[in-house]
Image (cartoon, rainbow, N blue to C red):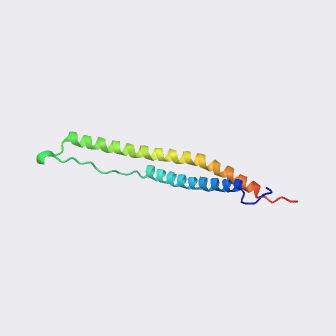
């Protein structure tokens, strides 16, 4: 390139690289967090029923409690999978954009023998 190193085009390329690199970093952090969440799920909080008028918890109440805990665990797992997919998608978009623009910068900075 015959112009200055800090031409408008080069500033654009460096800014795109900076933004996509930040996106890659955030996507990587989200991926690690989603993987850990899938491998080590949140146990959740037990849902307890207050027996009415000092009575005991019935078998039906215990079944309802277990069902609600199961639903809570499924929702937690679903959120982890969605986070994993979002991280992969962000890496799939930002990674190639970063590589493409960085190669453009490197290609322009190669010294030419004259």
Residue 83 point in image, percent of width and height: 48, 47
Is the residue 59 above or below the residue 12 in the image? above
Q: Quadrant of residue 52?
A: top left
Residue 39 point in image, percent of width and height: 45, 51
Residue 7 appears left or right of 58: right
Is the residue 59 above or below the residue 28 in the image? above
Q: Work out whether residue 91 or residue 3 is closer to the camera in this orientation and state it.
A: 3
Residue at 30% across, 41% down: 67
Residue 73 point in image, percent of width and height: 36, 45
Q: Work out whether residue 59 or residue 5 is closer to the camera in this orientation and state it.
A: 5
Residue 45 point in image, percent of width and height: 30, 51
- Residue extending farthest top: 60
Residue at 81% across, 60% down: 111
Give the total of numbered labels.
0
Q: Work out whether residue 14 or residue 89 is closer to the camera in this orientation and state it.
A: 14
Residue at 44% across, 51% down: 37
Q: Where the C terminus falls, by quadrant?
A: bottom right
Residue 71 appears left or right of 102: left
- Residue extending farthest right: 114
Residue at 68% across, 51% down: 101
Q: Where the N terminus falls, by quadrant?
A: bottom right
- Residue extending farthest left: 53
Q: Quadrant of residue 89?
A: top right
Q: Quadrant of residue 109?
A: bottom right
């Amino acid at each position: 390139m015959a112009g200055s190193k800090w031409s408008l085009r080069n500033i654009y390329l460096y800014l795109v690289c900076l933004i996509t690199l930040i996106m890659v970093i955030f996507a990587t952090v989200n991926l690690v967090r989603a993987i850990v969440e899938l491998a080590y799920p949140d146990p959740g909080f037990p849902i307890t029923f207050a027996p009415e008028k000092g009575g005991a918890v019935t078998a039906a109440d215990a079944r309802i409690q277990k069902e609600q805990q199961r639903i809570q665990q499924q929702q937690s797992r679903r959120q982890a999978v969605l986070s994993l997919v979002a991280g992969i998608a962000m890496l799939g978009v930002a990674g190639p954009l970063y590589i493409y623009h960085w190669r453009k910068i490197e290609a322009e900075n190669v010294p030419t023998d004259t």
